[in-house]
Image (cartoon, grey):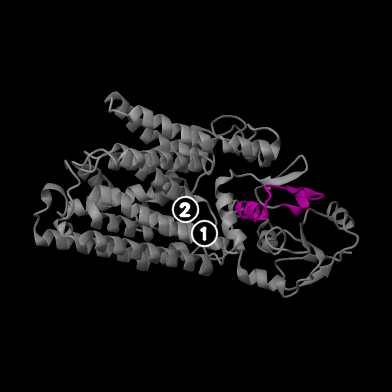
Amino acid sequence: MASTAVPDVQSSLNAPRRTDLAALAVALLCVAASRWIAVSVFEELPHLEDEFANLWQAEVMADGRIALASPPEPQSFLVPFVVDHDGVRFGKYPPGWPALLAVGAFVGFPAWVNPLLAGVAVWLTYRLGSRLAGGWGGVLAALLVATSPMILMLSGNLMPHMLTIVLTLAFSLAWFDLFVPRGGAPLGPGMTGRRLLVALAGLSFGLLAITRPLTALAVALPFGVHALTLLIRRRPGVGRELLGLGAGAIFVILLLPLWQWALTGDPWVNPYTLFWPNDRIGFGPGIGVLEGGHTLRQAWINTRHSLWAWQHDLFGWPFVSWIFVPVGLWAARKRPEGWIAVGAFVSLAVCYLAYWVGSWLLGPRYFVEAVPGLAVVSAAGLLWAGGWLGTEVRAGRARRLAMAALLAILLGVNLFGYLPGRVGGLYGLFGITRQALESFEAVHPGRALVIVRRNPYWHGYGNLLTLTAPFVESDLLLAYERGPEVDPEVVALFPGLPAYVYDPAEPGMLRAAR
C-alpha cells in the first residue's frame, strides 16, 4: 500500500465532518460507559494498593503539600504503598498521575478523571487511525478502543494507565506529524507549527516518563529505531528537531529526581524500595519475592499469563482479539505508523520481563499503552480484508458484507458476552464494597480511635480508609490490628480519645478497646 488509500466514500466534502462527529459520539459513549463502571462496578472506591497510594497522594497534593508527617506507630496506621521515611509519609509512585488526580480531588471528583481521559484517548485513537486507514478507519479504531475490556477495566478505577495512554498517543501523533508525511503531502506543517509539535512531543514523553518510567522506555524504543532511520537518510532539519524534542523531554524528566530529593533527601532513591527493598527492576538476588531473586524463567511465566489474558481482553474476542493485527501490518507495510504501533507492543512485553510482578487481574495492564496502536492496525487490517483499502478497493459486495457481518459478530460477542462478565466480575474486588463501608458508617463513633481487625488481610481495613484524613476531613483514626502486644500501646498513645475494636466480619458492631 503506497499511500493511505482510504475508502472511496470519504472523497465527498462532507465525509470528514461525518467521521469527526462519529468519532466524537464514540468518545462520549466511552466516557459514559467508563463513568458507569466507576460508579456501578468499582463504586468510586480504591481497591488495589496502587489506587489507595495514588488517591492518598492526590488528596495531599490537592491540599498544597507533597508529604505529611508520619503518625506515631506508622505500621498501625498504614496506607497501602504509602512510605514512612525519616518521619515523613508519602506515596511511593512517581508524581505524574497523583498530580493530575489531585485536580479531580481538589474539585471533589477524582473518580471522573479516568473516564474523561478515556474519552480523550478514544478521540486521539481516531486521529491516529485516520492517518493510517482514513476517516472511517479511524472511527473503527476508536470503536475498538472504546469497547476494549483492557481499556474499560482501567478507565473506571483510579489507576494511572488512562493518562499514560493519552500521553503515548499525543507523543505518537506529534511525532508522526513531524516526521511521517501523509501520502504525497509535504513533510509536516510550517516552521511555527513544527516547533509546537516538537514541544508537544517532548512534553508528552517527559510526562509519560515521570508517570510510568519503564513504560516510557518501552514506548521510546520503536520510535528510537525510526529516529535512527531518519538520521541515516539525512533528512534536512531532522537532527535539530530530534535534539529539541529530547531536550524538552529531559527538562520534564528532571522533575523526577527533584521529586525524589524533596521527599527523601536523595534524588536517586527510588521510593518503591523504601516500601519493599526487593521492589526493583532487573534479575538476580534481592529482586522480587523468590528466594533466588527474579529469573528469566519467572519472567516468562508472568509474561505468558499476561499474553494469555491479552488474547481475550484486547478486544473481548476470546482467543482471537489479535486476529486482524497481522493483516493490518501487511496492509500498512509501507507506513511506519503500523510498524511502530506493533513495535511498541513488543517492546512493552519485552521490557516488562524485567519486572517481577505480572499483570492480568485488571487485564495485562503493562501492555495497555499499546492498545490504541493495535486497534489502528486491526482497523486497517479489517478494512483491507474487506476490500475497502489499497488495491482491493473494488472488491465484491459479498466480501464486504461478509467482513461487515464478521465485525458485527465479534463486537456482539464482546458487548453481550465477554465484557459484562469480565468487567462486572470485578465488583467487590477483595471484598471492598460500598455496602461494607456503609455498615461501618451506621455505627461511626465520630472522634475516636478504631482498631480494625485483620480479615485476614488488609482489605477490610482498607475499605474504611476513605473515611479518614487526608481522604476527607475527619477526626476518626483507624488503626490496623497488629496483635495484643502492640495494639494496647497504640490505644495508650491517644488517652483523650474513646477507643473501639471493629471486625469487618461482624459489620455494624463496635466493641470497646479499653
Residue 342 visible in the displayed image: no
Residue under numbered circle 1: 113
Q: What is the x, y in percent for residue 68?
A: 73, 49
Q: What is the x, y in percent for residue 510?
A: 79, 70
Q: Quadrant of the C terminus?
A: bottom right
Left or right: 304, with 397 as reference point: right
Residue 396 visible in the displayed image: yes
Residue situated in front as seen by the camera: 449 or 1: 1
Q: Is residue 142 above or below residue 83?
A: below
Give yes or no for residue 57 being in the magenta stretch.
Answer: yes
* Residue at (30, 29) in percent of width and height: 230
Left or right: 94, with 149 as reference point: right
Q: Amino acid at mark 2?
A: Met
SS for tag 1?
Answer: helix
Is label 2 in contact with label 1 (beta carbons under 8 Å)?
yes
Q: What is the x, y in percent for residue 15?
A: 21, 61
| Cα distance between the residues tagged 2 and 1 | 9 Å
Q: Amino acid at mark 1?
A: Val
Give yes or no for residue 454 being in the magenta stretch.
Answer: no
